[in-house]
Image: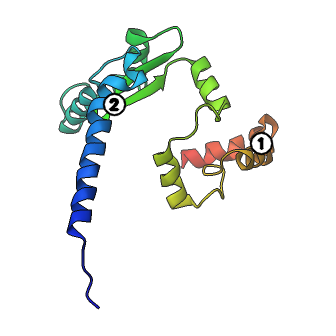
Amino acid sequence: MRCEFDVYGILLYLIYSLVDHGYRMFIYERFLNPLSKLPGPKVLFVLAVLTVGTLVLGRGPQPSKCGAWSASSWLSAKFGTKIGMVSFTFLFHAYRLMPTSSSAIEHILNDPTIYPRPKFEQDTLTKYLGKGLGLLTAVGKRHRRQKKALAPAFSPRHLRGIAEYVWWSLQY
């Protein structure tokens, strides 16, 4: 049996993909994305790549001279807002939102209905960990039920009992 390809179908799919990706990367992300209206640097990704490159090559700021949260602190100090959010561009000019205050982080983590996990992240976790079986991949009621079942294991009383073993294992 011979397999024949529909050349026009493949060509139409390629044209559609180019137009769709072009719209998303160039028109939507640059002009229509609501995150582009928030304060923040517009070329952070390029700066991050240059910084990582200089660290790998041994030039520029060294890890011992700046703290682990120096980029976050700089963003918060320079572009911080009353709402505690900073917007920056990422790969292919895609905007990302970074909370810079503890109240903003608490609001995001405590309301998963407003802030669902991104689809690509959910798909990646599901691919490697299974669909909805663990705490990381479960959503909604199943996630709440699993979180409630695990809560006693992370109570202060229980953690005090295992702190010595954790400390000992970190030393060796």
Would residue 135 be visible to someone looking at this image?
yes
Nearest the viewer among 98 and 155 is 98
The residue type indicated by label 2 comes to Tyr
Is 162 on the left or on the right of 130, as rendered? right
In the structure shown, which secondary structural element does the residue marked by tag 1 occupy?
helix
Nearest the viewer among 150 and 20 is 20
Q: Position of residue 69 (x, y in %)?
A: 43, 24
What colour scheme governs how the chains and residues are painted in the rendered image of this protein?
A: rainbow
| Residue at x 42% of width, y 22% of height | 34
Tag count: 2
Q: Position of residue 82 (x, y in %)?
A: 52, 8
In this view, 11 is above or below 165: below
Tell me the residue that label 2 is attached to. Answer: 28
Q: Nearer the viewer, mark 2 or mark 1?
A: 2
In this view, 139 is above or below 3: above
The residue type indicated by label 1 comes to Ala
Q: Which mark is residue 38?
A: none
Nearest the viewer among 125 and 31 is 31
| Residue at x 50% of width, y 60% of height | 127
Mark 2–mark 1 distance (CA, rounded to whole Å): 42 Å
Q: Position of residue 107 (x, y in %)?
A: 63, 24
| Residue at x 28% of width, y 57% of height | 13
Q: Which mark is residue 151?
A: 1
Q: Position of residue 86 (x, y in %)?
A: 43, 19
Is 113 on the left or on the right of 30, as rendered? right
In this view, 131 is above or below 135: below
Would residue 63 be visible to someone looking at this image?
no
In the structure shown, which secondary structural element does the residue marked by tag 2 occupy?
helix
Extreme-front residue of the structure: 8
- Circles 2 and 1: CB atoms closer than 8 Å: no
Is 78 on the left or on the right of 102, as rendered? left
Is 37 on the left or on the right of 156, as rendered? left
